[in-house]
Image: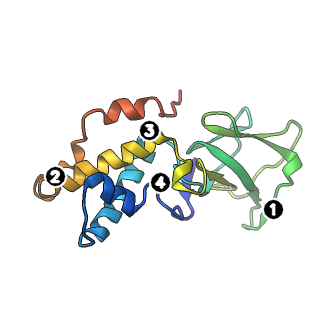
């Protein structure tokens, strides 16, 4: 099972102006750098927590349905399932009617269950099932929980202040104090 992000988020959880205020930067000379640090920090927070901060589309690929016919849809939080497609042996897709599956938006991670009695077997042996879904807290940075926004700001500040160390010694692996504790309560765990 593979999940692919179909497009980048339309906005970041923290804007450049907010990050500059946090950094006490009052010039525009580092705006491109700060924007890049925001993207990198969001990606780090999302990877560590298995969450999407801002709503955007994803696609889950499966070779076959799991034994219990329930598919985890990470990253969390699951906003909605858009479409489920099954490919036949010739590679032609068939969109499954929404009445044939059930989405659990409240689970962590979200889940999709193929209803009992539904025979929706793929003919294509690899990636014969595709599930398009959206995940994230909302469409604006303000929709993201404040702790996760603060984690992004902490990373931006740390990386901005230690730019030379990052370039010289690869110090992006060194994280600011308290970041792990901030992210711990937001991690989506799996068995």
Instruction: Where is residue 164? Give x, y as percent.
Output: 12, 58
Helix, strand or loop at mark 2:
loop
Q: Nearer the viewer, mark 4 or mark 1?
A: 4
Query: In this image, 184 relative to 86: left or right?
Result: left
The label shown at residue 94 is 1
Q: Position of residue 42 (x, y in %)?
A: 41, 52
Distance from the alpha carbon under mark 3 to that under mark 4? 11 Å
Above or below 107: residue 97 = below
Mark with earlier residue (4, 1)? 4
Q: Nearer the viewer, mark 1 or mark 3?
A: 3
Please give the residue where the numbered disc 3 appears in the rendered image. Answer: 147
Pick the front one: 124 or 31: 31
Query: CA–CA distance between discs 1 and 3?
Result: 41 Å
Q: Which residue is drawn at the image coordinates 60% and 57% (left, top)?
A: 139
Tag in front: 3 or 2: 3
Query: Sequence order check: which comes first, mark 3 or mark 2?
Result: 3
The mark found on residue 80 in the picture is none
Identify the disc placed on residue 13. 4
Residue at x-position 84% and y-position 39%:
115
Q: Which residue is mark 2?
A: 162
Task: Please tell me which of labels 3 and 4 falls first in the chain.
Answer: 4
Residue 129 location in percent, x, y?
70, 54
Q: What coloring was used for the rendering?
A: rainbow
User: How far apart in space, not on screen, are marks 2 and 1 (Cα)?
Assistant: 51 Å
Q: Residue 112 lies in what quarter of the image?
A: top right
The residue most toward the bottom is 29
């Amino acid at each position: 099972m593979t999940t692919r992000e179909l497009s980048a988020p339309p906005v970041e959880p923290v804007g450049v102006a907010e990050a500059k205020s946090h950094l006490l930067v009052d010039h525009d000379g580092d705006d491109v750098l700060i924007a890049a640090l925001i993207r990198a920090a969001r990606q780090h927070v999302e990877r560590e927590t298995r969450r999407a901060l801002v709503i955007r589309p994803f696609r889950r690929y499966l070779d076959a349905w799991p034994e219990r016919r329930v598919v985890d849809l990470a990253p969390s939080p699951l906003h909605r399932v858009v479409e489920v497609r099954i490919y036949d042996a010739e590679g032609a897709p068939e969109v499954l009617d929404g009445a044939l599956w059930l989405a659990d938006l409240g689970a962590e991670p979200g889940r999709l269950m193929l209803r009992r009695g539904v025979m929706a077997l793929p003919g294509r042996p690899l990636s014969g099932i595709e599930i398009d879904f959206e995940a994230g807290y909302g469409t604006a940075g303000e929709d993201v929980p404040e702790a996760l926004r603060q984690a992004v700001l902490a990373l931006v500040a740390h990386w901005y202040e230690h730019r030379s160390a990052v370039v010289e010694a690869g110090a992006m692996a060194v994280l600011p104090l308290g970041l792990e504790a901030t992210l711990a309560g937001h991690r989506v765990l799996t068995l």
